[in-house]
């Protein structure tokens, strides 16, 4: 009599995908996130802080 345990099922191998990656839209293809700061709701103090933060040092 053969009392060997049944082999456990194997996980399927990852399939290779041959789609064209340039057909899909990436996050770089959208304008979201460009130049936007979180929490900036247009108050003048935040605008002044951003202006001073982004000003080059030779313009002080």
Image: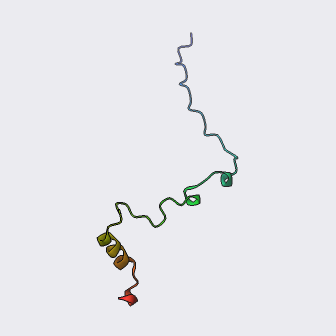
Instruction: Locate the N terminus by quadrant.
Output: top right
> At 34% across and 79% down in the image, what residue appears?
52
Q: Nearer the viewer, residue 2 or 20?
A: 20
Instruction: Locate the C terminus by quadrant.
Output: bottom left
> At 53% across and 61% down in the image, what residue appears?
31
Judge whether 1 appears above or below 38 on screen.
Answer: above
Q: Is 21 placed left or right of 2 in the picture?
A: right
Q: Nearer the viewer, residue 7 or 36?
A: 36
Q: Nearer the viewer, residue 53 or 26?
A: 53
Can you tell which quarter of the image residue 29 is in? bottom right
Counting from the top left corner in percent of width and height, residue 23 is at 68, 52
> At 64% across and 40% down in the image, what residue appears?
15
Q: Nearer the viewer, residue 49 or 57?
A: 49
Can you tell which quarter of the image residue 56 is in? bottom left
Q: Residue furthest top?
A: 1
Q: Is 7 placed left or right of 51 in the picture?
A: right
Counting from the top left corner in percent of width and height, residue 57 is at 37, 86
Counting from the top left corner in percent of width and height, residue 45 is at 29, 72
> At 55% across and 23% down in the image, what residue appears?
7
Q: Is 20 placed left or right of 4 in the picture?
A: right
Q: Is 37 placed left or right of 21 in the picture?
A: left
């Amino acid at each position: 009599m053969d009392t060997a345990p049944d082999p456990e099922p194997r996980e399927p191998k990852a399939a290779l995908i041959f789609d064209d990656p340039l057909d899909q839209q990436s996050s770089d293809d959208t304008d979201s996130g460009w130049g936007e700061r979180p929490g900036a709701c247009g108050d003048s103090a935040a605008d002044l802080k951003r202006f001073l933060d982004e000003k080059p040092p030779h313009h002080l």
